[in-house]
Image (spheres, rainbow, N blue to C red):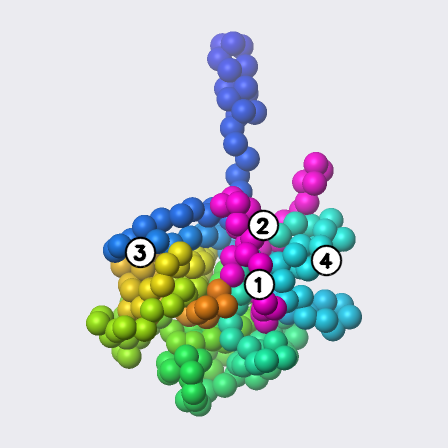
Amino acid sequence: MIRRAALLLAALWAAPAAYAVECSDAAYAGNRYSICEVDASKEQLRLFLKDGEGQVYGHFSSLKEALAGEGKALAFATNAGMYHTNRSPVGLYIEEGGQAMRLVTNAGPGNFGLLPNGVFCIRKDRADVFETLAFQDLSPVCTHATQSGPMLVIDGELHPRFLPDSDSYYVRNGVGTSADGNRVVFAISRNAVTFHQFGSLFRDHLKLPNALYFDGNISRLHAPQLGRSDAGFMMGPVVGVVEEASSDE
């Protein structure tokens, strides 16, 4: 009995540590993706734009450095919504309860204005993707929120403007959420895909009822599990998972 208990204890001791975010590379319908899943009921999911001095982070390296100064680590991150040339958000942006940009409900140029668009809203113990007008009607209180567009999946249906035979191919990234708000899945394509292909990933493969497009060619991913931390020109809003830094970092 004692020996069995000792073996069990040894097995638990040797078990790999659980990650705050589970990332993997996957293939679906002939395309390649990097997919990261977060349990919003357990992990610290946040948005980031500027540091304490009002300077845009712009890069994962800058954000990692700032968090390290607080004894924290960046477990995962990706760009989170469209922005102007000065990196200010195009649509609604809330960080730590403070609103930096209002909700935009009218149609407009570019992908953001391809209605319906939506809002990624982080609340206590959950996160949700809402279609913009539904968000306006419900008025959920978000600790963090970013508006982007277009919606990829709306209540289980693909965006009505997505065409199966589209010839518009780009690297794309976005986020989808489960009905209970616990399961949050971020995906970035590893090859150029259409909106229809990308939306189908969230609806048919990941089985998520709502999903939102973040952006195209500027898409970036920080995923230590995959040995990946993309560099490039400055980003605007970033969404990430923060955890306590380990003692050996």
Within 10 Å of the Cα at label 1, are there few (<14), some (14-19), or many (20+) other Cα atoms? few
Q: Which residue is mark 4?
A: 66
Q: Amino acid at mark 1?
A: Gly
Segment tinted magenta in the rendering: 220-249
Residue 134 in percent (x, y) is at 41, 79
Report if the CB atoms under discs 1 and 4 are less than 8 Å apart.
no
User: Label 4 vs label 2: CA separation?
Assistant: 14 Å
The single residue placed furthest to the left in the displayed view is 165
Q: Secondary structure at mark 2?
A: strand
User: Label 3 vs label 1: CA separation?
Assistant: 23 Å
Residue at (63, 67) in percent of width and height: 58
Of circles 3 and 1, the one toward us is 1
Of circles 3 and 2, the one toward us is 3
Query: Quarter-wise, where is residue 247 in the image?
Result: top right
Q: Is residue 44 left or right of residue 186?
A: right
Within 10 Å of the Cα at label 4, are there few (<14), some (14-19), or many (20+) other Cα atoms? some
Residue 196 in percent (x, y) is at 28, 69
Q: Which residue is mark 1?
A: 232
Residue 202 in percent (x, y) is at 34, 61
Q: Amino acid at mark 2?
A: Ala
Q: Earlier in the sequence, mark 4 or mark 2?
A: 4
Q: Earlier in the sequence, mark 3 or mark 4?
A: 3
Q: Secondary structure at mark 3?
A: strand
Q: Which residue is mark 3?
A: 31
Q: Which residue is mark 2?
A: 75
Assess whether residue 223 is covered by the magenta stretch.
yes
